[in-house]
Amino acid sequence: MEGNTFFNEEMKEIIGEFIIESKELIETATNDMVMFEKTKEGELINNVFRAIHTLKGTSSFLNFNNLAKLAHVSEDVLGKIRKKELSPEKYLIDLLLESFDVMRMMLDEIETRGSDTTETGELIYKLEKVLSDEGKKVEILVEEEKAPKSFETACGFRTEPDKLEKTKDEKLEKEVLAKNDTEKMEAKKRSQKEEQTIRIDVKKLDDLMNLVGELVLGKNRLIVLNHSARTSGLTEHVIDSLSEVTNYIELITNELQLSVMKARLVPISKVFSKIPRMVRELCSEFKKEVELKIEGEETELDKSLIEVLHDPMVHIIRNSIDHGIETPEEREKKGKPRKGTLSVSAYNEGNHIIIEVLDDGKGIDTKAIKEKVRERGLLSEEELSSMSEKEIMNLVFLPGLSTAKTVTKVSGRGVGMDVVKTSIERLNGQVYIDSEIGKWTKLTLKLPLTLAIMKSLVIEKDDELYAIPLNSVVELVKTKEEDIKFVDKKEVVVLREKVIPILDLSYAFGKNGSRNGKGYLVICNVDDRTIAVKVDHVVGQEEVVIKPLGEFLGNIGGIGGATIRGDGRVILILDIPSLIRFTSSQVHQKRT
């Protein structure tokens, strides 16, 4: 029984590794296939062929025969393209990409059900028809499906058949042997790469990050104790020793924190690699021609951010192609090249990652935006007239706002853009939009490197402490009562000839704080919208560990989480974007 249990567990591990490895192979094959269609570079089709060949061998070895058969027929088609016996026409690329999608579905099925029962008969028929139309007989080697000649399995060991059966066709035998030699060389190069890398369960990394978070809290506590020791009359020796330990713990904690963060970082190519296929399909759907440029794929981001970033990027790319870039005929009439350009780039900026999506399309018509806002009564005429062109552009993030003339599946920039903004702000990030009518539109995402630990400004209001994310803080202003003015009975401050609404946390959270002008104003900016948060005292900058509020308190407006300070006090972390929206809605309700 023990032996059987061990074997079952071992097979589960092997199959788990097979699924991970195979999904990576299919993703690589898909991306290379799209690039090959564009460049016709021979090495790309070789890469696709090798990826599907490896998938065929491993799936057959593990007795996932339906997957192996689909991979085998796809491999035959790829082999013909590779030998230039088949022309890589669009319909053929579409068919191969469809087969890759079905393989991915079958892997999901294996992962959840342990079998590959997805119906593939029609797809295999289409692939075989492609081969038979060329006057070539489709040969499926039963021996190769049952026992692959040579391959490297997902669990890292190699399998060689005991004996290679003789074939009647000497030419075919030579081809099989040549393929084996090539496969051995390629397998050796994969094995070499894996020696330098290791897969880590994300759950383990999450646990490790939580431990680091607790260590940061311990470091903060130790700093407080160090301060207390200095003021309690302890001997100089004790104070020096405590200071030494504090400095050491702080150094180790910082290094450990940095190491864990690096371990969690993955290249943003995980997101960017899906864009070429998406662009290809959208261009086909909307009859447009677009040249895609991607830069900064090696830029690294926390894995948790990578996973959430996919949907916002889908919305952005879709809107750029559907509503941004014109049709070839429209572009020719405007004196532009028939083919539009879509540039996607990523780079580091301090403790943040910047992602930019730029298209050379029609730009954003601010007059049309104003018209739509007036039509829906979203803002008053007075508010619209006081806004800059850039502020009006950012109104496209209002829910449901669209300037599209016709309705399509992805319609205008307003459709889905509120989802983009909400998703990015949930990540403690920011999103900006800029445009020049008739020429270009650029959307910029600014994201933190990690979500677990962040720098903040700790402030005090009515004897309560709050943390404000430092990435939204612009400056601090010490105020006097005469500095505060009133517009429509709402407090504002005039700073460098700009009227900034004031947010009083006491009233925002339903407390009866004293209304006076003494204290500080924390000037915060998100998406070119600014508010001044009124506080009594500024405690200082601190590195805080973000803790969720839990199931029952998780959706409190204006609060993004909580943290524990060095003295043991629990303080709330302010959600500045939602507080800005709250302030805007209050002003709008008052005026209407």
Image: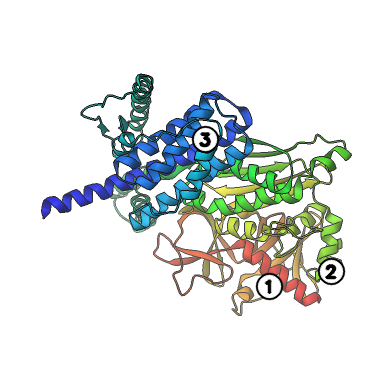
Discs 3/1, front: 3
Disc marking residue 132: 3
Q: Mark 3 Cα within 10 Å, few/some/many (few <14, many 20+)?
A: few
Work out how far the residue at label 1 is from the one at label 2, CA to CA, in angstroms: 39 Å
Q: How is the image coloured?
A: rainbow
Quadrant location of residue 189? top left
Q: Mark 2 Cα within 10 Å, few/some/many (few <14, many 20+)?
A: few
- Seen in the picture, residue 464 relative to 30 is either above or below; the reply is below
Q: What is the three-letter code of the residue carrying label 3?
A: Ser
Q: In which quarter of the image is the N terminus?
A: bottom left
Visible in this render: residue 519? no
Visible in this render: residue 69? yes
Front-lying residue, 343 or 278? 278
Q: Which circle's residue, 3 or 1, is located before the other in the chain? A: 3
Front-lying residue, 486 or 389? 389
Number of marks in picture? 3
Q: Where is residue 206 in the image (x, y as percent from the top left)?
A: 38, 53
Quadrant location of residue 207? bottom left
**Residue at x 62%, y 28% (from the top left corner):** 39
Q: What is the three-letter code of the residue carrying label 1?
A: Asn
Task: Look at mark 1 in the image and give the residue it sits on.
Answer: 516
Task: Look at mark 2 in the image and give the residue it sits on.
Answer: 375
Residues marked 3 and 1 touching at CB (< 8 Å): no
Residues marked 1 and 2 touching at CB (< 8 Å): no
Q: Which circle's residue, 1 or 2, is located before the other in the chain? A: 2
Work out how far the residue at label 3 is from the one at label 2, CA to CA, in angstroms: 60 Å
Quadrant location of residue 452? bottom left
Q: Position of residue 474 (x, y in %)?
A: 65, 52
Identify the element where label 2 is drawn: helix
**Residue at x 87%, y 62% (from the top left corner):** 385
